[in-house]
Every structure is written in C-alpha cells, then in structure tokens.
Image (cartoon, rainbow, N blue to C red):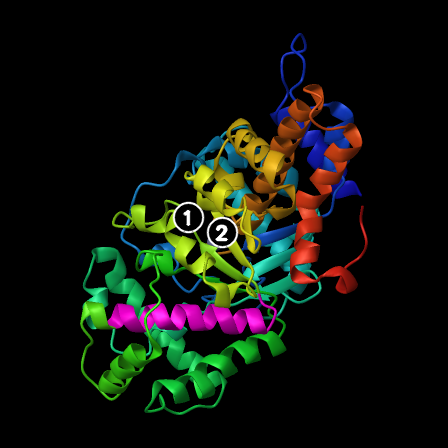
Amino acid sequence: MLPLTRVLAVAGLALSVPLAAQSPVDSALAGYIAGIRAIDNHAHPLLPTLPGAPADTDYDALPLGAIPPFPLPRGLSADDPQWIPAWRALYDYGFADMDAAHVKTLLDAKARLARAQGVHAAEWALDQMGTEVMLANRVAMGPGLAPPRFRWVPFVDPLMYPLNTAAEAAGTPDTRSLYPRESRLLRRYLRDIGVPALPATLDAYLARVLVPTLERAKREGAVAVKFEVAYLRPLDFGDPPAAAARAVYARYVRGGTPTHAEYRTLEDYLFRTIAREAGRLGLPVHIHCTDLAGGFYRIAGSTPLQLEGVLNDSTLRGTRFVLLHGGWPFVHQTLALLTKPNVYADISMMSAYLSAHTLADVLREWLEEMPDRVLYGSDAFAEHNEDPVGWADVGWVASLKARRALGIALTAMMRDHDITRERAQEIAVMVMRGNAVALYGLGGGIAGNR
Ligand SMILES: [Zn+2]
C-alpha cells in the first residue's frame, strides 16, 4: 500500500485548498477513492528498456511524432509544471522547477531506476499510479507488458486500407505521413497470419485477411480493438451495398489508385464489417474521438455525433463501442450517445490535461445520467523511456487528477442530496474499475478489490 499512501501524500501537497473554505472533496470519500485499484481503459505504455533491445516503435500506429509540429494543449506540454509532483513522487526529484540542470538529475534517476527494475519497470509504474490493469493500445506487446497487468488493444485501421492510398494521403500535410504507416502495418498483419499477398476479391479478403487478423488478436490476448481513423477521415461512415465495395476492391487490388469516392465506399463497408466481426468475437471497439491531433486534423469530422449512423446500425448492436477521450470538448454529444444501449466513453487524455475542476464538471453531467457507461482512462504515452515526461508520469498525473475530479463531482452530488455516500462510493468504483471489469469480462483474471 506504500505507493498509494505516497500518492495521497503528494496529492495533499499539490492540491491543498485554503483551510477556511470547505474542501470540494469530502475527505473520507477522497480516501476511499484513492484506495481503488484502477483499470485504465486506454494508454500507450512503452516496453521497459532492456540491454541490447531495439527502440520500441510499436507504442502507436500513428504516433504524434509522425505529424508536422502543431500546438498542444497546455497540460500536454513537456514544460507544464503539473509533471513536477509526479517526478517528486516517482523519482525523488528534489526540486520545484524544471531548470535544465535539475532535469538532468531526473533523467539520471530514471536511468538508474530502469536498470534496477529491468523487465518489471512497467509493472512498477502501474503500482505507483494505483492501477491494477492497463489496457495497452499498441501495435504489438512484448517483454514487460504482459497479462494480467497489461491487456492488449491492437489497431484495426490498416484493415480498411488494402488498396493504394496515394490519393487519400495527398489530402493534408498530416495525412501524407500517416497513410503510408497504415499500408506498412497492413503488410505486417498479412505476414503475421501467413498470407503472402492480397486476395483477388473482397469476399476472399474478408475471409482470409480481415477475419483471421481479428481472430489472431483475440487468440493472442486482445480485449478490444482500436480505430484512430479520425486522424485520416471523418467518422461519418456510410452504409454502402456490398456490391459497390466489391467492385472497388476488385478494380484496384492489383494496381491503380481509387478515386476518393471509391475509397470511401470501400472504407465505409470495411469499417462496419470490422465492427461487426469484432462484436461477434466479443471485442469492444475503441474509437479515437476528440479534437486532437494535428494542425490539419478534421475536428468537425471527429465529433461524437458523426458516429450516430454506425451506432444506429441494427446489425452492429452486438458490438460495444467506446468513445475514447470522451469526445472532448463535445462532451454533451457524448452524453447523448451514451443513452444508446451499446455505447461507453472514457476520460483518457481528458484526465491528463484538463484541470480536475473542468473534468469534474463533465463527470457530474455524465454520472447523473449514465454512471454505468463511464470509464477511467489515462492515455499515458511517451515516445521514449528517456523523455523527461514519460508515460509513467502522464499515467500518474492522470490517475491522481481523475480521482480528484471524481471526488469533486461525487461530493457535490452528495451535498446536494442527489446520492447517498454509499452510492457515491459505488459510482467511484464503477468508474475507476467496475464498468471496465463488466465491459471486458476481466472478472476472473484480476484480483478482487472493492
Ligand atoms: Zn491514445
């Protein structure tokens, strides 16, 4: 329990309020929430750095580094002071600033810790955040990121792009580098299932590539699949007839470049097919849904309501969808969609860069209506273990801030007599872990906690 005690101690330091004012968080409730072992719905943990191992490049299919530089929200910037409490808690950082010479001592401490912990470094990081299980959204898993603590969420976007994407890629400076990554990843998926070349017909592609790739993911431990297709195109997937998609596939599978309209027909068909097959396999579908990232990112195309056609598809009601990043800042659209029977939302990324108060306002609105559909998430990520702000630091801050926000929201509901203390505790457990246990069927594989 030492790590959690440490989290609490630092929380007290970093987030103290004037003594005269009533605390926005009931102290007993805060203590209860701090003790909940979380299930993190969405993150990109890195493989621990091991001697002689190559750099980890599987942490994201479309990494931020692949996009031309663009302004980040304040709370995601490496020089934001919110990371300092994480450094102090995790690495005994002895300073209250980010002076270059001081940060050098941080990097030395991180390197020493990585050497000492070896393959256990990632599990150690989870212990510091009070997270029992982290869903790892990665191209592939590897040493140090293994069940039961880490569960795999692979990317399925590449399955939508079997044809030449040159015309699609030309759309914006962002997409120019992103589409080729999808094509390379699809070739890797083909190798993984031992298929030497794309089949000649769409039906054969579904039977020999798309379905076997999803089945392989399930066999290898995936608990969900992830689309980050909002980086590439709007989320307003149409519902074209199979014949139209078959015609596009057959015309271009051996060469040539589809027109934009033709590619969209195929993408729309494949998106729904992937979602349907994932549902058949019991794999919830994660969808990147927020206003980031990239200077040319299509914000209007990535708002939650763009997905309503998909969510209203009666053939997809066997598939559970999770709106990652809560659709932020379009959180009312998210709330509206949570009233559908198969839709969930997480607070990943929101927990990393919003203030606890802003996040609490969102949570209160969602939890008043649909408390069984809201999931904790961190979006903990970094490009290198050697970065000053590592994925463990992001995850630590997100965990602390999410608990604080949940405490603020539930305390206000308690003080307004909307809910009892018992119900507040119950909802806290649901958000931090219980809803995820139910969604992914994690019950048997993890230790019981609250
Ligand atoms: Zn992410």
- The image quarter containing residue 262 is bottom left
**Based on the displayed image, in which of its 4 quarters is residue 241 positioned?**
bottom left
Which x, y percent locates residue 110? 58, 49
Q: Is residue 127 above or below residue 217?
A: above
Please report the residue visible at 45 percent of the width from the left and 66 percent of the height from the top. Answer: 57
Q: Residues within 10 Å of mark 2 (few under 14, many from 20)?
A: many
Expressed as whole percent of the image width and height from the top left, the position of residue 426 reads: 75, 39
The Cα–Cα distance between marks 1 and 2, rounded to whole angstroms, is 8 Å
Residue 388 visible somewhere in the drawing: no
Which residue is drawn at the image coordinates 61% and 26% (left, top)? 14
Q: Is mark 1 within 8 Å of ligand 1?
A: no
Look at mark 2 in the image and give the residue it sits on. Answer: 323
Residue farthest to the front, as pictured: 314
Report helix, strand or loop for mark 2.
strand
The kind of residue tagged 1 is: Pro
Q: Residues within 10 Å of mark 1 (few under 14, many from 20)?
A: many
Q: Is mark 2 within 8 Å of ligand 1?
A: no
The residue type indicated by label 2 comes to Leu
Q: Nearer the viewer, residue 164 or 438?
A: 438
At x 65% / y 58%, what residue is drawn? 439
Give, as a single range, the part of the protein colored magenta: 263-283
Q: At which x and y percent is residue 45?
A: 55, 57
Q: Main secondary structure of the magenta part?
A: helix
Above or below: residue 150 compared with residue 39: below
Cβ atoms under marks 1 and 2 closer than 8 Å? yes
Q: Earlier in the sequence, mark 1 or mark 2?
A: 1
When the figure is inspected, residue 439 is found, relative to residue 78, above or below; the finding is below
Residue identifier under label 1: 304
SS for dot 1: helix
